[in-house]
Amino acid sequence: MTRVFSGIQPTGEQHLGNFLGATRNWARRQHETDAFFCVVDLHALTIKLPDGEVRDGSLRLAQMLMAVGLDPEVCTLFVQSHVREHAELAWLMQCNVSFGELSRMTQFKDKSDQHAFVSAGLFTYPALQAADILLYDTNEVPVGDDQRQHIEITRDIADRFNSHYGETFVLPEAVIPETGARVMDLQNPGNKMSKSSESPKGTIGLLDDPKQIEKKIKSAVTDTDGEVRFDFAQKPGVSNLLSILGAATDRDPASLAVDYAQYGPLKADTAAAVIELIEPIQARYRELESDPAETARLLAMGADKAREIAAATMDRARTNVGLLID
Ligand code: AMP
Ligand code: TRP
């Protein structure tokens, strides 16, 4: 059976971009594959956060992932730091990736520009991500478009390791959805929707109330030519709305354009579709939120399942790389 692995950081609130670009596909794929989903708390430590944020955020993110449809009885849902092999394999990855390769990562360039203290961990972040993926003999990594480069470098590291030390890792493929892979900011459609956006009006949080969602979509930036057409280069704002509506209703954004002669109805339909998509998630989240002990139990169960596979891969890597086996 195809093995799927993906990870998500426990920082900030989940937004429509994470859902349409990544987690919705995770929920869909869990039924057809052997799927592992990981709350990557060690990755969150690459940037200094307020005390307690990683701990609380990990629990809340796990609950949100269950609310969007990940079923811990169907897939393996766990927290990265609960499986020690992630940090251990990351070291072997760091020793098999070059300074030059890491220097070319666009996520590092973006994030290091935003912070005064640039940790070594932020620089070696892709090595830890490669460890996450390779530990599980992963075939497919479902992610948004921004993660393409990280999956490429994971393949390069695996390939290099295999040719130096013998067949050890499976080479993974990125799986990027056709619609929703890049949800743009509603106020700045040139940037992707993100939790760290300058204006909260540009990002739709999965916990925003329906009135807020409607308001944000109605005030989304468009343009002045008044024509509804799917053309990201010329009409980024309108195309982003079509793309959100398309992803929310599982329709092709370009063919949706012909249904609209004006921006008003496009915005109204997009808001309604997004609210319909998000409301049941919010209801499930509220239920899960009330029982943190149950969430902790489910995460412990996930970590047990993950550890079993991770330990076997780690043993193989330790042997092949040439360590004295204890
Ligand atoms: P992040 O929020 O950066 O931790 O990303 C978590 C997952 O959501 C990754 O697979 C990203 O590729 C995906 N993602 C984040 N932002 C967006 C966006 N604006 N559009 C589509 N996918 C996104
Ligand atoms: N770097 C990913 C992001 O920013 C998160 C991540 C960490 C990840 N490890 C992973 C994604 C392994 C896929 C597979 O979204």
Image (cartoon, rainbow, N blue to C red):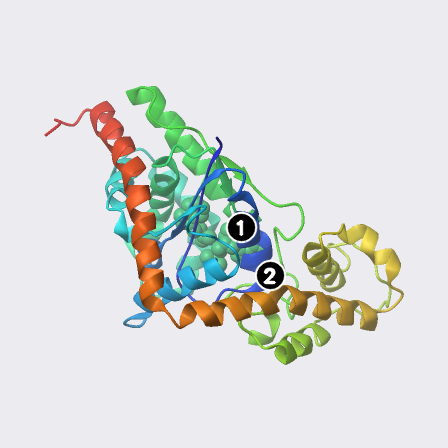
The kind of residue tagged 1 is Ala
- The C terminus lies in quadrant: top left
Check the image and report above or below for 80 versus 309.
below
Of callouts 1 and 2, which one flags the residue occurring earlier in the amino acid sequence?
1
Viewer-side label of 1, 2: 1
What residue is pinned by disc 2? 191
What residue is pinned by disc 1? 27
Extreme-left residue of the structure: 326
Measure the alpha-carbon separation of dots 1 and 2.
26 Å
Depth check: give the residue in front, 106 or 141. Answer: 141
Asked where in the image residue 244 lies, by quadrant, the reply is bottom right
- Location of residue 178 in the rendering, given as x and y in whole percent from the top left corner: 66, 45
Label 1: how many Cα within 10 Å (few below 14, some 14–19, many 20+):
many
| Contact? badges 1 and 2 (CB < 8 Å) | no
Q: Is residue 114 left or right of residue 144?
A: left
Check the image and report above or below for 324 versus 174.
above
Depth check: give the residue in front, 183 or 303. Answer: 303
The kind of residue tagged 2 is Asn
Q: Secondary structure at mark 1?
A: helix
Asked where in the image residue 256 lies, by quadrant, the reply is bottom right
Label 2: how many Cα within 10 Å (few below 14, some 14–19, many 20+):
some
Residue 48 in sight in this render: no
Q: Residue at x 46, y 52 (%)?
A: 71
Q: Residue at x 64, y 61 (%)?
A: 190
Q: Secondary structure at mark 2?
A: loop
Q: Is residue 135 left or right of residue 189?
A: left
